Amino acid sequence: MKLKKLQEQEIIARLTKDGLSCGEMLEQLTPEERNKYRNHILQCQGTNACIANNIDIIKQILDLGEDYIHAYLRQCRCVPEKDGDRDRTGLMFFKDIVYTQGRLGEIEKLKHYNLFEAKDEAEFFRFQSYKDDSEKNKIVETYIKGYNLYLESIKFLTYPAYKNFYKMYCRFRKIGVKQKIYLTYLKVLHKIKVYLELECEYGQLQK
């Protein structure tokens, strides 16, 4: 009995020590054990302090499933944004993985906990463009069809690099005449801006 208790104490100690120890311990636990100790995994101070330095922890949370993800995001929501406190929760890494993999269910959760803003939506499109910037990107298509985009995100799509995503937006969403004219104006403006930036860079290289 004492041995079992001691083993539990050791497990908890390793889970709450720091991000590296927590990640190593998680790999050794069975799914049942992970569930048993999930409060220690998600709420310990040590993990909060070190999680930004250990992306493996974020991957583990995503792999562990719905309950863990909800618990993690609830915890992130409680951390103030000032002075970079929220950054130490590893939320940035969580978002990067979610946007790259196109995990729309996790984006839905981020929205539920008010952790998804216009800049996040733009980042989602940016990460997806790295994977597939064509009109055949089904993840982006599903997102555009299913959600009303932030105005800032719509403007973001008028940059030349996202022309195919912009075409999707025009195809799947109803756009008024005034908005269409305004967005066309932005497209031309951004195209000129990108051209001038390239010309400037080329000029610098020639010096």
Image (cartoon, rainbow, N blue to C red):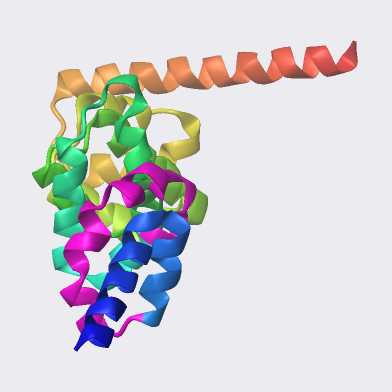
Q: Is residue 188 left or right of residue 203?
A: left
- What residue occupies the far left of the structure in this picture? 112
Residue at (16, 42) in percent of width and height: 173
Is residue 105 placed above or below 113 in the rendered structure?
A: below
Q: Position of residue 22 (x, y in %)?
A: 39, 63
Residue at (46, 50) in percent of width and height: 133
Q: Is residue 178 left or right of residue 41?
A: left
| Residue 66 quadrant | bottom left
- What residue occupies the far front of the structure in this picture? 2
Q: Is residue 148 left or right of residue 170?
A: left
Magenta run includes residue 34? yes
Say which quadrant the N terminus sits in.
bottom left
| Residue 166 quadrant | top left
Of residue 122 and residue 54, the one placed in the foreground of this image is 54
Q: Position of residue 158 (x, y in %)?
A: 38, 28
Q: Position of residue 77 (x, y in %)?
A: 16, 39
Magenta run includes residue 66? no
Of residue 13 and residue 74, the one placed in the foreground of this image is 13
Magenta residues (range): 29-57
- What residue occupies the far bottom of the structure in this picture? 1
Is residue 36 placed above or below 169 in the rendered structure?
A: below
Residue at (13, 26) in percent of width and height: 176
Q: Is residue 44 left or right of residue 70?
A: right
Report the predominant secondary structure element of the magenta stretch. helix
Please indicate, yes or no, whether residue 119 appears anywhere in the rendered image. Answer: yes
Say which quadrant the C terminus sits in.
top right
- What residue occupies the far right of the structure in this picture? 207
Is residue 111 placed above or below 105 in the rendered structure?
A: above
Of residue 123 and residue 171, the one placed in the foreground of this image is 123
Residue at (22, 79) in percent of width and height: 5
